[in-house]
Image: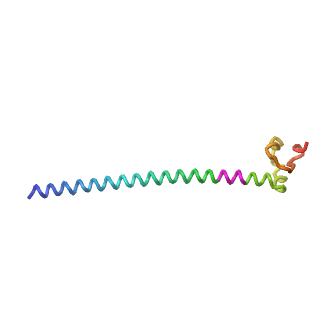
Amino acid sequence: MDFVIGYLSFVICHLSFVICHLSFVICHLSFVICHLSFVICHWLFVICHLSFVIGYLSFVREHPILAELLSSHLPPATCHLTPNTYHLTHECQS
């Protein structure tokens, strides 16, 4: 009888260890997936932000009124970077 109780205790202990180990593996995989999702989301946010900034700057440089307001803040060396029909500064016109 003692052998049966000892054997059942060993089986229960072993099953508990297996379940605990599987729980740890699942928890670790969940953390890895969560971390990868965060990294991907972060880089998508960076790409989105850069795209917005580039699009906004392009819009500002092409808009006639905003381009004229911006011309006082831009150095004349940037004139060749704006291939539009608006003259930003007097240096660009010459």
| Residue at point 61%, 51% (across, down) | 46
Magenta region, residue range: 49-55
Image position of 35 (left or right of 26) = right
Q: Nearer the viewer, residue 70 or 83?
A: 83
Give the vertical position of 52 relative to 77 (above or below). below
| Residue at point 81%, 55% (across, down) | 63
Q: Nearer the viewer, residue 69 or 86?
A: 86
Number of numbered discs visible in the structure rendering: 0
| Residue at point 88%, 43% (across, down) | 91
Image position of 89 (left or right of 27) = right
Which image quadrant: the C terminus? Answer: top right
Asked whether residue 89 is drawn in magenta, I would say no
Q: Residue furthest top?
A: 77
**Residue 11 found in image quarter:** bottom left
Magenta: main secondary structure equals: helix
Check the image and tell me how it is coloured.
rainbow
Which image quadrant: the N terminus? Answer: bottom left
Give how far across and how far down residue 84 sits, in percent: 83, 49
Q: Residue furthest right?
A: 94
**Residue 9 found in image quarter:** bottom left
Give how far across and how far down residue 34 sits, in percent: 47, 54
Asked whether residue 50 is drawn in magenta, I would say yes
Give how far across and how far down residue 87 sits, in percent: 87, 49
| Residue at point 40%, 52% (across, down) | 28
Q: Residue furthest left?
A: 1
